Image (cartoon, rainbow, N blue to C red):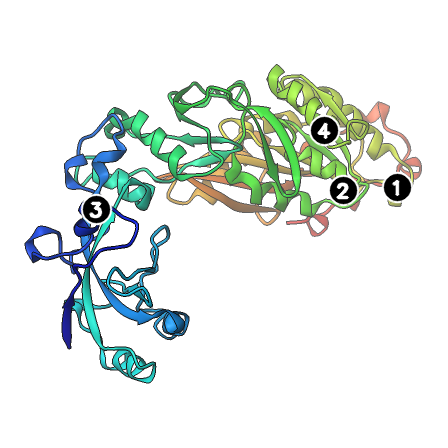
Amino acid sequence: MLLAQHSGRIPGLPAAAQTANFCTMREAVEENGSPELYSPNPEVRGMTLLNREAFKRTVVVPVLKVKKEIVHALLKALKHTVLQRPGLKRVIEDPEDEGSKLVILDPHQVPEFSLGQAEQEVLKQLDIPPEVSRYNLELTYENFKSEEILRAVLPEGQDVTSGFSRVGHIAHFNLRDHQLPYKHLIGQVIIDKNPGITCVVNKTSIIDSTYRNFEMEVLAGESNLVTKVKENNISYELDFAKVYWNPRLSTEHSRIVELLKPGDVLFDVFAGIGPFAIPAAKKKCVVFANDLNPESYKWLLHNCKLNKVDNKIKAFNLDGRDFLLGPVREELSKALALEKEAQKPAVHIVMNLPASALEFLDVFRHLLVGEPCGAAVLPTVHCYGFSKHENPAKEIQERAEASLGASLDGRCATYLVRNVAPNKEMLCISFQVPADVLFKRPCPAEEKPASKRLCTGKDFTEENVVS
């Protein structure tokens, strides 16, 4: 193979700039073959104040000289060999021949600036001279990905943060200690490299178990934290500084709503801004939604109106325990008092407060007075919790059983929702509340004759329980 060396002028560019694009001395710029070929200038290591100009770097890449009319055919034939890096042109002007173009090849696919036998055959068929040339390619800040920039800046060998939660125009980070000195640079890089993100925040405290919000610091961009998100084709508006929202729970929200049928009753004990309640209402369920946080309650009402379901959801601003002992008990009594079995809707109770929801399950102990009438009308609870146990499903079940005072063996299902942190899982345990837990049987003197009861305790067996 012949090795050509371009040194001609590129029309329209100053001579100084043109000369810099082509290599005349191999040691003048970095050759291919380096695993850091697309890394920024190493001098940016330790930078804490973003200086975009400092990221410039010139590397040598292989190019082919090709007639303009056959450039497209070559790109198609050598699609795995030509440069495929976003933001970099694969085809550039030939400074020595207006009738030709220079096609940049991937340096990792063309070691030692020589093509393989298969590529040479393609060139022969297209009547392209088999000469691989060197081209000085200048890379700037705009050409590097955010992860490449942060890896070049942060201390060598340290974890690089490139993942974040996106909430509308906000990028939410949980930075580690070694990343904090670079937090403002990280924020600006994320805004630069992610269209639509105009604010970057970092969580500075653990989630408040009472209102489920946390303190945060704006690292870069605007300080406006009122935003709009879309989840499962439903729009929500919220103040991210004052309410809880986690885009990683989208799949779980959808999973629970898919269990519901039109006419079912949903009690959402810790409703937030409505990611369970609003889609359930749109599905023509009867919905009762509650949240203790006044801001969450405000945005819940706002989102109900936004999605035109404000007349289908009864909203409450109560402590979760008071909600269960008040509206939930009252509505359950009404639902179970219906005479015809067909009229009794399926009832679901969602308790998404994983830090402490399992502790609320004791409320179901003798919540109702009367006789159970079969598993078909017993409420199904979907309760969330965190676990660091080596067997998280078993541990969550044992904690639920301890609160209920009854065994759930064979009549519950546990789902892994997501990994929250190393060795910390979020799970959902679903079960129908056992009849002997939910119902407090009346005293013998208060009992009605058996013939007048809808059913007796004998009608309820474990065979009727959905597991």
Query: CA separation, marks 3 and 1?
Result: 81 Å
Q: Name the front one of labels 3 and 1.
A: 3
In the rendered structure, the answer to whether residue 364 lies left or right of residue 396 reads: right
Instruction: Tell me the kind of residue under disc 3.
Output: Ala
If you read the primary sequence from the N terminus, does the residue marked by circle 4 or circle 3 appear first?
Answer: 3
Which element carries disc 3, helix, strand or loop? Answer: helix
- Closer to viewer: mark 2 or mark 1: 2
Mark 4 belongs to which amino acid?
Answer: Leu
The foreground one among 84 and 327 is: 84
Please report whichever mark, 3 or 1, sits nearer to the chain's N-terminal start: 3
The residue wearing badge 4 is 306
Indicate which disc, 4 or 2, sits on the residue closer to the N terminus.
2
**Disc 1 designates what residue?**
343
Q: Which residue is mark 3?
A: 17
Q: CA distance from mark 3 to mark 2?
A: 63 Å
Q: Nearer the viewer, mark 4 or mark 2?
A: 4
Circle 2 SS class? loop
The reply to whether dot 3 and dot 1 touch (C-beta < 8 Å) is: no
- Residue depth check, mark 4 versus mark 3: number of the one nearer the observer: 3
Q: Are marks 4 and 3 in contact (CB under 8 Å)?
A: no
- Other-residue count near label 4 (Cα within 10 Å), few / some / many at <14 / 14–19 / ≥20: some
Residue designated by label 2: 283
